[in-house]
Image (cartoon, helix red, strand yellow):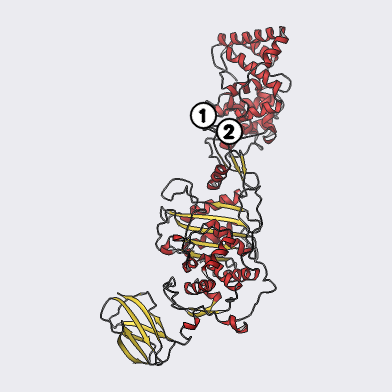
Amino acid sequence: MLDERPLMMRARWIVLLAVGLWLAALGRDRFDVWVDATVLPPLALEMSVEVLDRGGDLLRAYTVADGRWRLALPPDKVDPKYLRMLLAYEDKRFYQHAGVDPRSMTRAVLQAVWNGRVVSGGSTLTMQVARLLEEGTTGEVAGKLRQMRVALALERRLSKDQILQLYLHLAPFGGNLEGVRAASISYFGKEPYRLTPAEAALLVAIPQSPESRRPDRAADRAEAARNRVLARAVGEGVLDPEEAQAAKREGVPGLRKPFPALAPHLADRAKDEEPQTGVHHLTIDADLQRKLETLALEAVEGKGERLQVAILVADHASGEILASVGSAGYQEDLRQGFVDMTRALRSPGSTLKPLVYALAFDEGLGHPETMIDDKPMSFGTYAPQNFDKLYMGTIRMREALQLSRNIPVVALTDALGPAKLISAMEKAGMKPVFPGDQPGLAIALGGVGVTLSDMVQLYGALARGGVVRPLSWRLDAEVPEGQRVISSVAAWQVGDILAGLAPPPGAPSNRLAYKTGTSYGHRDSWAIGFDGKHVIGVWMGRADGTPVPGAFGADVAAPVLFQAFNRLKGKLDPQPAAPASTLLVANAELPQPLQRFKSRNAVFEAAADAPMVAFPPDGAEVELLASGLKVKVAGGTAPFTWLADGVPVLVGSDAREAMLAMPGAGFVTLSVIDAEGRSSRSSVRVR
């Protein structure tokens, strides 16, 4: 490399070097001993840890210990025209000399004497590698002699390609960029295996004076140096004049580009779990990951500075994770973007309901067309309510799941027993966490801690006909076949029910099988769905677990789910056909026991035609009008008697709707008694 020091001092150094070489040649044996005794600097370089996607593209890289970017690059992975330009400009006889080139040294001395100034240096690429390995200087006589000795020793211990690879790793490119690959990614935003002539020439030119030729700080100097390399390339026959002229018209990059940082949470996990591994190969698809990270940012934009989102995509046939977005933005901010929300414990809301129905179908407790009651019920001391605090009476199980009614699913869980549901979750590879380690019927409504990864794996089992496939994210991982969680018939039935859900407004009606969920207090919003090949889960909420008022899975997470499938490929893979043993009939054609669900407590339950307070529903808040409190009764036989806290307020009414005179606001228990003495009650708050 050229140095701008005074002529006489530089000439003296070169003469001294030439004399040294001449003296060494006189004593070849002693010279060989001297070279062989050279203590070399460490040749094993610390390289940047790399995380690659399923196709080998860079997802993320990490700096080495001193903060430099130094990425591995074998000579066969760099553009050949770059190598030809490098050798033509720096060391034409690289493959002929033994580390030090006497011809170059002699030429450098003669040119300096003839021109009265230093015209060219005599350093070979091997000598430059020696200097870079030891981080030595270029000008001092002792330093130059040391470079020559190390260069000669390197040539005896390494092949030419190994020496060239050291240069490709160590060449400085300004700032914390070290090596050709780091420079190509930072300056051009691409790998160096395919460079334009202008890009290749710039990468040859910068290491000669890396700080003064940085294109992001001194574009004019960088361009001038690049053009000198292009001119030399023409003179050496590497480029034709037309190629060089076209290359000179190409601008130099004015800014450094950021290094890829896709799937940062998963990349960190890979690095932390295997700290000795230099290159991690993940199942992630970089293009899909990039699209979904953009979608995540769009999903939270303008919706408050604390709202967060996580998205997980898997191929449910193989279990491979194709995209993992742990948050919208990997940073320490109010969204806590550094937290991987695909692994955080959250309440699943209603997204466990499909598993309950599938187990019930398997146990012979019902069929999609079985009728089930959606009305106020108590299970011991547990009295669940529907989310909207309304009741629909007797409906089909298909509708109960599609409309996400709470009472029917709790009744099914009660009939199954919570242990059955817990066992199925564990068979699916989930690791549920229960408040106080006391699982009860509330788990059917989200009273359990699970992760987005858990839920995607569960829905993947539904999509695979009831057999779980553990999720994997390392490309070389051996993933065992999971066990069967539910039958293929029950899995298909649930998938068919979920495919009948109406899509969010503006989304395509493509029969995507999906389910939404909202946890207690609006802390978690979910949407998880699958087609014939992929399963995608979306979670939205706040990383700190505080409520997001008014956020529902159907309104917030479901649109993101449909957009994620659209970014995946646009067109869904069809669901499989129903297994041959599936019973595809209407309710009236079902076997008698399957026509209507009967709970464990059926013997104690009121008859189907018994009276029921239809309005106001139990637990509701209602407004007291000037004319009184509006009430409705369903079922039963007129006339009806209405009581408020046990006091009759309306007697012998034939109407099913009435206005009751109330003393004022507050909590009140309303009761209705029909002509046969059957009764129903509802506790409400009047305001």
Of residue 180 and residue 74, the one placed in the foreground of this image is 74
Looking at the picture, how far across and down is residue 428, in whole percent? Answer: 59, 61
Could you tell me which quadrant the C terminus lies in? bottom left
- Label 2 sits on a secondary structure element that is loop
- Which of the labelled discs sits on residue 70, or is there none? 2
Say which quarter of the image contains residue 165: top right
Which dot, 1 or 2, sits closer to the camera?
A: 2
Of residue 549 and residue 245, the one placed in the foreground of this image is 549
Where 563 falls versus 58 (above or below)?
A: below
Looking at the picture, how far across and down is residue 182, in whole percent? Answer: 58, 35
- Label 1 sits on a secondary structure element that is loop
Mark toward the start of the polypeptide (1 vs 2): 2
Where 4 falls versus 291 (above or below)?
A: above
- Which of the labelled discs sits on residue 434, or is there none? none
Could you tell me which quadrant the N terminus lies in? top right
Looking at the picture, how far across and down is residue 210, in whole percent? Answer: 55, 26
Q: CA distance from mark 1 to mark 2?
A: 22 Å
Q: Amino acid at mark 2?
A: Arg
Query: Answer yes or no: do the residues labelled 1 and 2 have beta carbons within 8 Å?
Result: no
Where 574 falls versus 106 (above or below)?
A: below
Name the residue at the left extreme: 663
- Which of the labelled discs sits on residue 218, or is there none? 1
Say which quarter of the image contains residue 304: bottom left
Q: Amino acid at mark 1?
A: Ala
Say which quarter of the image contains residue 659: bottom left
Side of 31 where 506 appears, left or right: left
